[in-house]
Amino acid sequence: MGQQQLLLIILGVIVVGIAVAVGITMFQDNAVSANRDAVVNDLVNLAARAQQYYRRPTSLGGGQNSFAGLSGDASGLKKLVNTSVSPWVNANGSYRISVAGTDSSVWLEGTGNEIGNDGSAKVRVTMEVRATRQATTVEN
């Protein structure tokens, strides 16, 4: 009877250990996915602000049908968010203008706080913003 109880205890410990390992993995995958979604959401918000800048006349601080005023430094980012530093940082990650604006487009980049799919680099998303659309690329 003692050996049977010992075997059941060992089996129970193994099952609990496997369940804990699976739970940790699922939690970590969910955290990465949630961070990636949050970064994309923040970039969509910044893209909408960039499109507003594009349409706004220069007399009101806009680009008058050009993204050219959105430079890759803090002054370009300040036109989208109220910050004097580049990159702009919030709870989801950091954001910057990766390719300065031209007449027709601007590139935004977001770097999340979680390690991405490759296991070494953080979540990274880029977005090309044009006057009427944006294209998102998830890089990690």
Image (tube, rainbow, N blue to C red):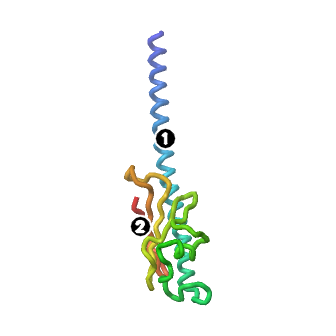
Q: Residues within 10 Å of mark 2 (few under 14, many from 20)?
A: few
Give residue 82's position: percent from left, percent from top.
61, 71
Q: Secondary structure at mark 1?
A: helix
Q: Is residue 13 above or below residue 53?
A: above
| Closer to us: 104 or 17 | 104
Which residue: 49% across, 58% down? Answer: 112
Q: Residues within 10 Å of mark 1 (few under 14, many from 20)?
A: few
Query: Residue 60's mark?
Result: none
Kind of residue at disc 1: Ile
Q: Which label's residue is closer to the chain start, 1 or 2?
A: 1
Number of marks = 2
Give residue 45's position: percent from left, percent from top.
56, 70
Give residue 4's position: percent from left, percent from top.
45, 14
Residue where numbered disc 2 is placed: 137
Q: Is residue 83 above or below residue 56?
A: above
Kind of residue at disc 2: Thr
Which residue: 57% across, 77% down? Answer: 79
Residue at the limit of the structure toward the left, as seen here:
118
Q: CA distance from mark 1 to mark 2?
A: 28 Å
Residue where numbered disc 1 is placed: 24
Give residue 43's position: percent from left, percent from top.
51, 68
Q: Are marks 1 and 2 in contact (CB under 8 Å)?
A: no
Check the picture and name the quadrant holding the C terminus: bottom left
Which residue: 59% across, 69% down? Answer: 83
| Closer to us: 94 or 37 | 94
Q: Secondary structure at mark 2?
A: strand
Q: Quadrant of residue 106 in the image?
A: bottom left
Q: Is residue 3 above or below residue 93?
A: above
Classify residue 48 as left or right of residue 109.
right
| Closer to us: 10 or 61 | 61
